[in-house]
Amino acid sequence: MSSPITTHILDTSIGRPATGVTVSLERKSSTGETESWESIGQGVTDADGRVADLMSSEKLVEGTYRIHFAIGAYFKEEGREAFYPEASIVFEVKNAQEHYHVPLLLNPYGFSTYRGS
């Protein structure tokens, strides 16, 4: 079975997947009035810009999640200057039975995302 939360990164400035980007996944937890982020997965994008198993051992539950992309190191490795050293996407899982694909479209001076399939 594949991970219930997946991502990939496309570097739109060169029209290719972004390889070697560290990606982490966190879930928001609340205790009383205190909120924090719990790490539940991490990986590095492959040659296709994907992380094969971002959420390997966790069960998907409803709640708020955050995917963090360490994009500054990617651009540095590519020998290109960039404005954003990192990008984070916060989203809600409202149905734990569904698959959530959250891609990142990236260039050195901007990024965007959408809910994929």
Image (tube, helix red, strand yellow):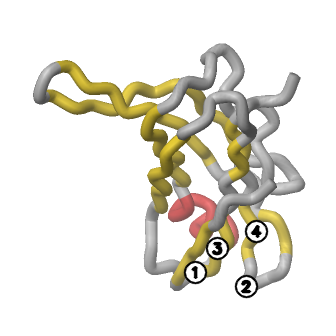
Q: Which residue is mark 1?
A: 108
Q: Nearer the viewer, residue 87 or 61?
A: 61
User: Disc 2 versus disc 3: distance between alpha carbons?
Assistant: 7 Å
Badge 1: residue crowd in 10 Å (few <14, some 14–19, many ≥20):
some
- The disc, 1 or 4, on the residue closer to the chain's N-terminal end is 4
Give the residue displayed 85% in from the left and 72% down from the top: 16
Q: Quadrant of the N terminus?
A: top right
Q: Amino acid at mark 4?
A: Leu
Q: Which residue is mark 2?
A: 13
What's the residue at 46%, 61% (across, down)?
86
Mark 4, residue position: 10
- Check if mark 4's residue and mark 3's residue have beta carbons within 8 Å: yes
Instruction: Tell whether 36 sits left or right of 3.
Output: left
In the displayed image of the protein, which residue is found farthest to the left? 33
The vertical placement of 96 against 71, above or below, is above
Could you say where residue 89 lies in the image, as x and y percent from the top left?
49, 56
Q: Is residue 102 above or below residue 39?
A: below
Q: Pointer 2 and pointer 3: residues touching (CB < 8 Å)? A: yes
Q: Is residue 87 above or below residue 59?
A: below
Question: Mark 2 belongs to which amino acid?
Answer: Ser
Which of the two marks, 1 or 4, is nearer to us in this view?
Answer: 4
Q: Residues within 10 Å of mark 2 (few under 14, many from 20)?
A: few
